[in-house]
Every structure is written in C-alpha cells, then in structure tokens.
C-alpha cells in the first residue's frame, strides 16, 4: 500500500513537471504588448449592509517586462448603479443608490502557462477609485485607494486573442471591500 502511494506521488510529480515544461508554448516574451476589455460585475461589501453590485466596463493595456511577467494599466468606469436600503434611527428605512464612478489601477501580472492554450495568472498592484452614494436627493462622492490583488485565467481562441475571466479585490479595508468579477478578451499586438 505504501509503495502504491509513493508510486502515485511520483507519477503526479512527473506529470506536473511535464505539464510545466511543455507550457512554454503559451508563454509571453519581453516586449510583447496587449490590450483588452471586460464586463465588470462589482461587489461592494460593508458591515451592516447587503452587498451592492454595480456594473462597469474595464479597459486594460499592458507590456511584458520579463517572460510571463507584465506591467498593466487599467481604467474601470461604471455603467450602472445598485440600490439598497438601511434602517437609520430617527429616519426609519432610508433608500440609497451606490455607484462606481471610475477606478484606475496599476498591476504587476504573473502568468503561469498551463498548456498551449490555457494560462492562469496572479495580479497585484494599486487602485484609486471614486464611488458615489445618493441619499435623499443628496449626492456624495468619495475617493478611495489601496492595495489590489486577484487571480484569473485566459483561454486562447486564436494565436493572439484570449478569452479572460478573473476575480480582483480592488480595495480591501477593515470595514468594507470592493471586488469584482471581470469577463472579457485580451489581444496581443
């Protein structure tokens, strides 16, 4: 039994090593550039509130600064807001609207090629975002910024076009978090 377990572990290591060594077909090289666009499904979570889900459009442009490592700039702007309500003592139930106005991010992206057509990646950087809340016909905007991180996957549909899906935490503070799932495309040029 112990011998069979060792054999299975060894086969797993050999298989994983072969997969990683053959993955260079997908890898990107220094100097390659790319751009892309994604639909953004955001999630604002704060203690005491239901999750608010504004939508947006994310545009990105990047350049590979090392094999499988890129520097990427992103611009995210809101397309729709989300409504909710909260009980406020003295006022009762108060309706409000939450909107992502825009966000600018700078990321370092590290690719891990899985096969000739599949790539997974991690992403980390900094985001500055502007949010707007409307209550009782009064609008208040606020700028927030912070460390951002996430992960994603890309599937090649052509030699230079990829379908991408990712999850990114844009701002993560003690009392709230803004994150999003982005689905879109990336094109090398």
Image (cartoon, helix red, strand yellow):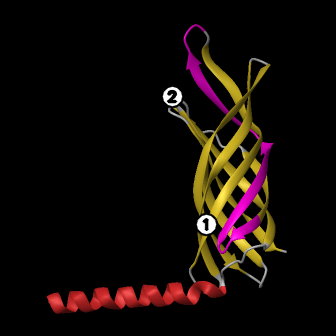
> Tags 2 and 1 in contact by the CB under 8 Å rule?
no
Magenta stretch: give its range.
63-90
What is the crowding at mark 2: few (fewer than 14 residues within 10 Å), some, or many (at least 20)? few
Q: Is residue 139 above or below residue 13?
A: above
User: How far across and down, in percent of the image, does residue 22 sit?
Assistant: 56, 90
Q: Nearer the viewer, residue 160 or 110?
A: 110
Where is residue 10? Give x, y as percent.
31, 89
- Residue appearing at x 65%, y 65% in the figure: 165
Q: Quickly name the residue at label 2.
A: 48
Q: Residue at x 66, y 73 (%)?
A: 154
Kindly identify the residue that appears in the image at 62 percent across and 27 percent down. 85
Q: Mainly helix, strand or loop, the magenta region?
A: strand
Q: How many marks?
A: 2
Res 110 label:
1
Query: Is the residue 178 above or below the residue 92 in the image?
Result: below
Query: What's the CA distance linking mark 2 and mark 1?
Result: 36 Å
Residue 52 in percent (x, y) is at 63, 39
Q: Quadrant of residue 37?
A: bottom right
Residue 87 horizontal/vertical position (percent): 56, 19
Q: Residue at x 61, y 65 (%)?
A: 152
Picture quadrant of residue 144: top right
């Amino acid at each position: 039994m112990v011998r069979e377990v060792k054999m299975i572990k060894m086969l797993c290591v050999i298989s994983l090593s072969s997969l990683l060594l053959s993955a260079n077909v997908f890898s990107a090289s220094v100097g390659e550039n790319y751009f892309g666009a994604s639909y953004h499904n955001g999630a604002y979570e704060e203690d005491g509130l239901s999750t608010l889900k504004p939508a947006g459009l994310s545009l990105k442009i990047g350049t590979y600064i090392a094999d499988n490592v890129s520097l990427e700039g992103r611009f995210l702007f809101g397309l729709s807001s989300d409504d909710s309500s909260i009980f406020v003592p003295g006022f009762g139930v108060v309706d409000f609207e939450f909107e992502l106005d825009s966000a600018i991010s700078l990321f370092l992206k590290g690719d891990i090629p899985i096969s000739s057509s599949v790539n997974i990646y991690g992403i980390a950087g900094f985001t500055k975002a502007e949010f707007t809340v409307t209550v009782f016909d009064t609008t208040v905007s606020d700028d927030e910024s912070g460390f951002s991180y996430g992960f994603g996957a890309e599937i090649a549909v052509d030699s230079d076009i990829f379908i991408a899906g990712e999850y990114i935490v844009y701002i993560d503070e003690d009392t709230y978090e803004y994150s999003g799932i982005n689905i879109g495309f990336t094109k090398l040029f």
